[in-house]
Image: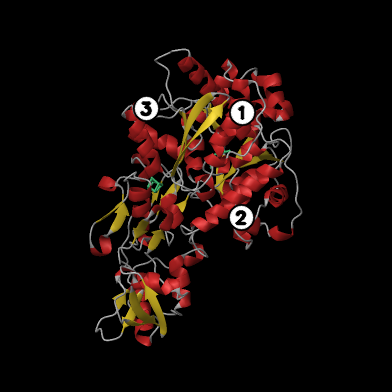
Amino acid sequence: MINLTIDNKSIVVKKGTTILEAAASIGVDIPTLCHMHLHDMNIENKPGGCRVCVVEVKGRRNLAPACCTEATEGMEISSHSIRAINARRTIVELILSDHPSDCLVCAKSGNCELQDLAHHLGIREIHYQGEQSHYREDTSPAIIREMDKCILCRRCETMCNEVQTVGVLSTINRGFEAVVSPAFEMNLDHSSCTYCGQCVAVCPTGALTEVDQTGAVIRALSDPEKTVVVQTAPAVRAALGEEFGLPAGTLVTGKMAAALRRLGFNYVFDTDFAADLTIMEEGTELLERLNKYLAGDQNVKLPILTSCCPAWVKFFEHHFPELKDIPSTARSPQQMFGSIAKTYFADKMQVKRENLVVVSIMPCVAKKYESSREEFSVDGNPDVDYALTTRELAQLINLANIDFKSLPDEEFDQPLGESTGAGVIFGTTGGVIEAAVRTAYEVQTGKSLDRLDFEELRGMEGLRKATIDFDGLPINIGIAHGLGNARKLLEEIKNGKSEFHAIEIMSCPGGCIGGGGQPYHHGNVEILKKRQKALYAEDQSKTIRKSHENPYIKKLYEEFLGEPLSDKAHHLLHTEYFD
Ligand code: HC1
Ligand code: SF4
C-alpha cells in the first residue's frame, strides 16, 4: 500500500492507483477533459492529452498530469495550488485559442464540459488568439461531426474502438490539423459507423452531436393540414426527468404524455404498444424456427437474434453479412409503429398518408438513421417522419415554456397508446428477451406462467446467459449489450459454437436506457441502474404484463393484420437486411 497526502489529507491507496483516482476516493475533484473510466467494463480512456488535470507534487520541478501519474510513497500533492490553477487556466486558454467561439449557438451550449471548465476557471479573455484551423462539417442521417470543436480527448475513439469494436474513428494528421476521423477522411455515412451514438454520448464539446430535427417538428405542429402523432420509446420515461433536475430513475411517463399534449401533438401514443406487437411477430418467428428444429429440420437458423436495435442491425450488415439471415426479420417497434400508424390508424381517422406526420421520441440517435432507411417508406413518404432524442424533447419542452415538474400525470391516447409491462422493459438490456419469453412460453406450452419476473435474464453484466424451462424443454438464452460483447456472440455463431436458441442484442451499454440520445450520464453506470430499476417498477405496476394479452394488439390482429406472420404482417412489420 502507498501512503501520501492530497491537499494535506493523509490517504492510503493500492499500488498502481493514479493521483486522479486517489483524489477522487477522498472527494477531491480534479478537472479533466479527456479522462473517462468505464469501471464496469474495465475500460479507461487516459491519453493524458488535455493536461487539464495537472497538480503540484512537492519536490518535483514539473507539474504532473493526475490521470496518468501513479501515486508513490510519501507524495505530497497540492491539487489546487496557485501554480496548478494558473497552468490549468493557460491550458484551457490554449485549447480555446483554437476553438470556435460560437457558444451562443452551439448545440452543446449548456452541456459542454469545455464551456463549464472555462467558466469554473474564471476565464474572461483568451491571450493566445491565432488563426483558427478549419475542417469541413460532416452531416450524416444521425450524427454531425464538427471537428473544429474537437479537443482530441479521444473518448469517442475509446467508445468506438474498444467498447463497440466498430473501429471507425481514429486521430489523423498532426498539430493544428489533427482531427478524429473515419479512414481516408471519408464521411460517417460512407463508413461502417453504426450510428450507435456512444461517441456522441461522451464527447465533452460540440464536436459530435445528433442531427437536430426539432425545427422540422415545430413546422409540422404548426401546419393546420397535418395530423401529428407522437410515439415515445420505453427508455425515455426513465430519463427525461433528469433534464429537468429530477433524480435519475424518476419515472415521468404521465408528465411526458402531458407535455407532449401541450406541445400540440394531436395524438400521444406509445412505442411500447409496438413493442408488444414486435413480441407477437418475433416470438412467433422464434417458435416457428424452434419447432422446425425440434422436428429435425437441419436447415433452420438458430439462434434467432433480436432485431429492434438499428445500430446493431447496421453492425451485422457491415461486419457479419454472412449471418444476415439469422436475426429476426421483425422491424423494430419504432418502425412497426410508423407502419401501423400510416395504414391502420390513418384509415381509421380518414387522414391521408401524406397528411399524417409520425414523430418518435427515442433515447437513441440511430433511430434517426433507421427512420431514413429507404425500405421504411412508401413512395418516398417515410413511415416515421422524425425521430427526436430524449434531449431534443427536453429542448422543445423548455422552448414552449412548459413547467415540466408541475405537470399532472396524463394517459396516452388509444388505440396505439396501450401497452403491457412487457413492452416497457424493452428499454433495458434483457427486457426484450424477457418480454419474448413471457409470450413464447405461454404460446408454446399452452400453460400460464406462474411467475413473470425472470431475474436470471436481468442485470448489467455485458454478456449474460440463462436457461429457461419451457415445461420440460430447456431454452438457452444469451444477452449482450455493447457491440463489443455482441461481436463475441456472433463469432461463436460463425464458428458453429453457439449454444443458444435465442439472443438479445442491444448496442448501447445498459440497452436503450444508456442510448446516445439520453441525458448525458458520463459513463456512470449507477445512473443506468436507476433508470433500469424505474422500468422494472413500471412493469410491476401494470395490470397486464404479457404482450399477447394487450387488448388493442388483439384488436389490431382481428381488425387488420389477421395472424402474426400473415402476409399483411410480413408486408408491414418485417424487413430484409442488406450487405
Ligand atoms: Fe429502444 Fe426499442 S427498446 S430499440 O431500445 O425495441 O431507441 O427505449 O424504442 O424501436 O420499444 C430505443 C428504447 C425503442 C424500438 C422499443
Ligand atoms: Fe463509432 Fe458508434 Fe460513433 Fe459510429 S456512432 S463513430 S459506431 S461510436
- Image location of residue 341, percent across then percent down: 64, 31
Earlier in the chain: of badge 3 and badge 2, it is 2
State the residue in front, 17 or 163.
17
State the residue in front, 566 or 524.
524
Q: Is residue 222 visible?
A: no
Q: Is residue 101 above or below residue 128?
A: above
Could you tell me which quadrant the C terminus lies in?
Answer: top left
| In this picture, residue 54 sits left or right of residue 376 | left
Could you tell me which quadrant the N terminus lies in?
Answer: bottom left
- The answer to which quarter of the image holds residue 561 is top right
Quick one: label 3, few (<14), some, or many (20+) residues within 10 Å?
A: some
Quick one: label 1, few (<14), some, or many (20+) residues within 10 Å?
A: many
Q: Nearer the viewer, mark 2 or mark 1?
A: 1
Mark 3 and mark 2: span between their CA atoms? 37 Å
Q: Nearer the viewer, mark 1 or mark 3?
A: 1
Mark 1 and mark 3: span between their CA atoms? 26 Å
Earlier in the chain: of badge 1 and badge 3, it is 3
Name which residue lies at 41% across and 58% down: 39
User: Which residue is under mark 3?
Assistant: 323
Q: Is residue 548 above or below residue 370?
A: above
- Image location of residue 493, percent across then percent down: 36, 29
User: Which residue is under mark 1?
Assistant: 439
- Kind of element beneath mark 1: helix
Name which residue lies at 24% across and 84% down: 61
- Number of marks drawn: 3
Name which residue lies at 23% across and 57% down: 173
- Image location of residue 8, percent across then percent down: 41, 86
* Three-letter residue code for mark 2: Gly
* Three-letter residue code for mark 3: Leu
User: Which residue is under mark 2?
Assistant: 249
* Three-letter residue code for mark 1: Thr
Name which residue lies at 55% across and 20% down: 570
